[in-house]
Image (cartoon, grey):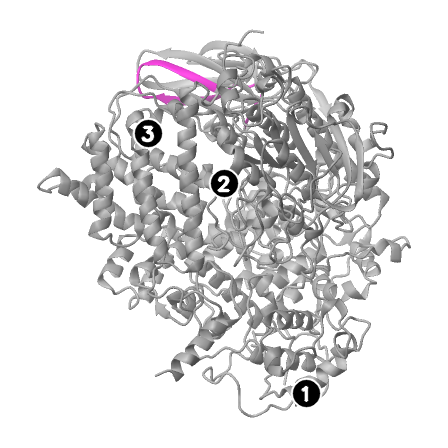
Amino acid sequence: MKTRIPHFLGLLLLGFSGCTPAPVERADENPATPVPATPTPEPTTPPPAKPVAIAEPEPAEPIVFGALDFTKDVKPLLDGYCFKCHGNGKKKGGLALDAWTSLEVAVQDQKTWKHVLEAVRTGEMPPDDEKQPTLVEREKMMAWIDRTVFAVDPDHPDPGRVTMRRLNRVEYNNTIRDLVGVDFQPADDFPADDSGYGFDNIGDVLSLPPVLFERYLAAAEKVMSLAILNDHKPRPDKIYVDLMQIEGGPKAGTTSVARKIDENESTIALELPVAGEYAIKLVAESEKLGGEGAKLEWKFNGQTLRTTELAGRKDAKDTLKATVRVEKPGSYPFTLRVANPLPNPETKNGRPVNRTLTVRQIMFTSPPQPVKAPPSQYKIFAPGRGQPNLELAAKAILADFGRRAFRRPLAATEVDRFFWIAKQAEKKGANFEQAVQTALTAILVSPHFLFRGELQADPDNPRATTPINEWNLAARLSYFLWSTMPDDALFAEAARGTLRKNLPVQVKRMLADPKADALVENYASQWLQTRNLKLVQPDARTFPEWDQALATAMQRETELLFQRIMREDRSVLEIVGADYTFVNERLARHYRIAGVEGEAFVQVKLPEDRPGGILGHGSFLTLTSNPTRTSPVKRGKYVLENLLGTPPPPPPPEVPNLDDKARVELVGTLRQRMEQHRVDPNCASCHARMDPIGFGLEQFDGIGARRDRDEGAAIDPTGQLVSGEKFQGPAELRTILLTKKRGDFLRCSSEKMLTYALGRGLEFYDRLAVEKITRSLQKEPSFSNLVLEVVKSVPFQMRRGEGDHRQYTEGRKTAAVAP
Amino acid sequence: MHIPDKSLNLPRRSFLRGLGVTMALPFLESMIPSVVKAAAASAIGGAPRRLVFMYLPNGMDMENWTPSGAGDKFELPSTLQPLTPIRQQVSVLSGLAHVNARALGDGAGDHARANACFLTGVHVRKTSGADIQAGISADQVAALQVGKNTRLPSLELSCEPTTRQAGSCDSGYACAYQHNISWRNENTPMPPIGDPRLVFDRLFTTSDEDPDLMAGRALRESCRSSILDVVREDAKAFQKRLGATDRRKMDEYLTGLRETEVAIQQQAKFKAENAAKPRPAMEKPEGIPGDMTEHIRIMYDLLALALQTDSTRIASMMVLHEGSNRPYPFIGVTDGHHDLSHHGNSAEKKEKIAKINRFHIEQVAYLLTKLQSMKEGFGTVLDNSMIVIGSGIADGNAHAHHDLPVLLCGGGGGTLKPGRHVRYEKETPMTNLYLSLLDRIGVKADRLGDSSGKLERI
């Protein structure tokens, strides 16, 4: 029998990573029997650390224990390994494991056992300088805690309880887009959302501070002003110049918010819709060169408007204004250039440097123009057509809009209340459109819109479980897969009561919809942390080749991998195991892949020296590095946390002072220096989990470029995981993840996605759901199967009343006894 | 100085430099009467007292922070030297502590705890999210009692980007702890705004200026109370049908609603008194500048303007969140700040930390100088302010939460005696300082977090 590192009982992670307990067993042929009745012989010696066989995926086999008895199985372990410091009157760190009055009392103390489990799983305890239990003993200890302290009843799975979620910024913007149809992102002005368990859609931490309510009201008013036009007076139009469309001059480094201008003319053809006077606003910046700022010469339609010298300060942007007049609508050239290039350009780093400036924004304001009612107005008012009178028309409009906004039908009394607002507006002089608009504004600040509430009878009864209704299910689905409200098809299914029945069809349809890109943008970017590429700042001296284009390309590479797996319904294992990747010219050059040109991404085979999948992605390798160097610790931690779901414990609160203990001068590669550093037994046990993974990836530098040497010495890319597997370099590490650690990866993928789908942290009782999803993935690891299993899971489908798991269990027992 | 023609080429900086003179100054001109009416605790020349809390992350290199002398005879150590021109307005307070930021059995997570404890003085609950619990912060205690005197009860600012770091935060603590110093109550953080454009809008832009909102403005404003009445009743009815945790969410909603109503009334009241959103001669910022120095300065400009225009008297500024790992390449520090703070007594790393500290103190000096240049009544805005600047960690390497680096700046409207180095007994609660300051702006508070009394000798 093969032995593996205990991954089950990841419970401990509960408080730390959002990953949950793993199964006591999994991938077995008989999933209905969670604990075999007959004891399985235990290996008597720890497993030999064999080199890993690299072949087809072989599902890892867990150690399976039979019934465990406290006195016979557990007490001797506590005696042998723990009581020296945590028993017999000693309570190091405030922890005594023999201070409870009875076993029954002891197992009620989940908080303490959670700590114990964490410490045992991660090898934090016993400390390295104490007698160490065998792997099997560790697993036995954990199995007992898991089954006894954190027992769950597979016949009565606890669905848990999702705290009512308010829409986060992304969801708010998307929902307004789909509900109202205006091109406006009000939530960009909202304060940042807090995240928990690694995601920003967690109901518990999405609080609603007063400043946000103010924003909600302002946003609702603005959205409705844009959606419904009740003033047909002509008004000016703002025309923003797309900086990417400017021709001529230096094009390098152009983004939608920055365009460089030099002494050559750069031109854009502007489409001006009407005759009349246009105001031009131009925001630019430049640095002084030769004691003088760049002079901007701007021409409109071939005529020089003026030449302006910019302040030429790094910390100051200049805002320039002018007006022009056109006699008829049409296309007009607008031209910019630097009028005062140096006669003899200076030289910096062997390259000529001349005066340039960077344009940040160009905006034209048109003369007042007649305005047409926007399409959103027709859509919103459509249900009112054909109604016999205005009151019924208004109510029909409110009921329809309200149903889509609240993601459920409105009661007649609710419609009446919103209609009352319309009446109030009317009394103050509103016309029909304005009156309805006012009532619709109220719908957008109603708690039923801002929060996704799920009502249930008896909400404070912890044993009251109920399937969520079809409307709530539609909302859970659409915010999970699309980060927005349900569409008409989902609403139709909910109205008919057929959504639950047709889940597989609907999930498939939703995953094929372009809106499913939300999973890439919001789920994958947080799970794999590619969002952080916007925040990393590699040191420009160490990594001169680093720039925004490379950062963007790296982020895109990972997104495209996830997107392909989703769109083509491929195996989720390709996150690690893909033998291809996506590059554009910039990224291909970074990876030393020849023959890729242009901005567009193409799918390519990987070179020999770079493994496929996330381990070889510049994104992962960069965002786990420090600005000036790699961080094997951070890389290891990322893999343990996000790919294997077995996070290391956090560092001790008082970080010991390594330098005092190892004052010898540290030399050699980063790896050699780190190994010399690792002398403290308090640190060694946890770093033994993280560092080797990072060492295996040392052939990639702090921005993911391939290298063979560090500090002049050859890199040693070998490593050994705490569970024994040895590897040489990233390719073999990847193979281990795909074979020995396949189950861990699938379980972690399930946990992460379930967390995101539910919008709450996972609890130990969720392990039944996680096990079930993981078992299914073992057989069929396709993306759609993962999504479908998450959607079908008990916590996604059901909810229960307020209270903790024990109240749920006890309540149920009482209920069973009571008549 | 004349008010410049906006159609000319004018860099933003030149507007700001001229601010003290070009903008309408409420306390010099026609507004004094109305403000005096409103002010609970007025000070020099009828101007009100202000209370500001500022947070700097990752502790300090204390060797270059703590002055050697005491009283008014002390040398400014190198980190504090940028304050030299304004040192008469700055006191260094040594010996204060936040014991509740310590582990106290909760293990790792000093950054999250220090951040959330800084203004609350409480030991926050260790949770990744399910049941966050901190406590009300000093600024919010003040906002609740005296916030009604200004258009905005309080202002929460930071110099952070709006995009948060993905992934988990400090050691099993929900990110809310590490990203908010201001807390409305134990469950609701007051998120700071880091985008100067949004702060500018909040302070100075009125819906009158938005062409999209031109149509039907009077009608819209007159209907707001009907809208809010209906959704309030809806929320209350909804709340009755929810479980305990969800009911708390509805409490947040109802609190937000009520405060928005008050804000609308305040707006109307101040408008009637002709003191509604003042118009600064400052271009509306375009967004978050790419350059950190510029970002900090523009946020400090806005903070100064908010105080000067009496838009609020209570503000908190989490310059950067605790544990921030930003590098400072523009001053030659390319390593991340948090990584560096675990310096292991490396002289080189400590020197870099001191460099970062000094950079931040230079920015603080910029703010204080600006407030000092803003005349009002017979003094300056700084004379009438009480500004606490500090960190919840002393030495970042040890994550120490005692002997915290703390500055108390401004004259407090004649109630503070700045320009000294005051040493307190070890482990004196930081919250004692807050109680003393709250007292000076007319706020009644007997306790806050771990406070044990008021702090003397400030």
Residue sitting at the far bottom: A38
Counting residues from the start of the chain, the first of labels 1 and 2 encountered is 1
Residue position for label 1:
A43
Tell me: A768 left or right of A646.
left
Chain to which mark 1 belongs: A
On-image quarter of the C terminus of chain A:
bottom left
- The alpha-carbon separation of the residues under discs 3 and 1 comes to 77 Å
- The alpha-carbon separation of the residues under discs 2 and 3 comes to 24 Å
* Most foreground residue, B219 or A513: B219
* Most foreground residue, A548 or A208: A208
Disc number lying in front (2 or 3): 3
Q: Residues within 10 Å of mark 2 (few under 14, many from 20)?
A: many
Do we see residue A706 in this rendering?
Answer: no
Q: Secondary structure at mark 1?
A: loop
* Residue type at numbered disc 1: Pro
Residue A540: x and y, percent? 70, 38
Q: Residues within 10 Å of mark 3 (few under 14, many from 20)?
A: few
Tell me: B235 left or right of B318.
left
What residue appears at the point 26 percent right and 30 percent down from the top-left corner? Answer: A229
Residue position for label 3:
B221
Tell me: A669 left or right of B108.
right
Q: Which residues are magenta?
A: A259-281
- Determine which of the numbered discs, if any, sits on residue A191 in the image: 2
In which image quadrant can residue A675 be found? bottom right
Q: Secondary structure at mark 3?
A: helix
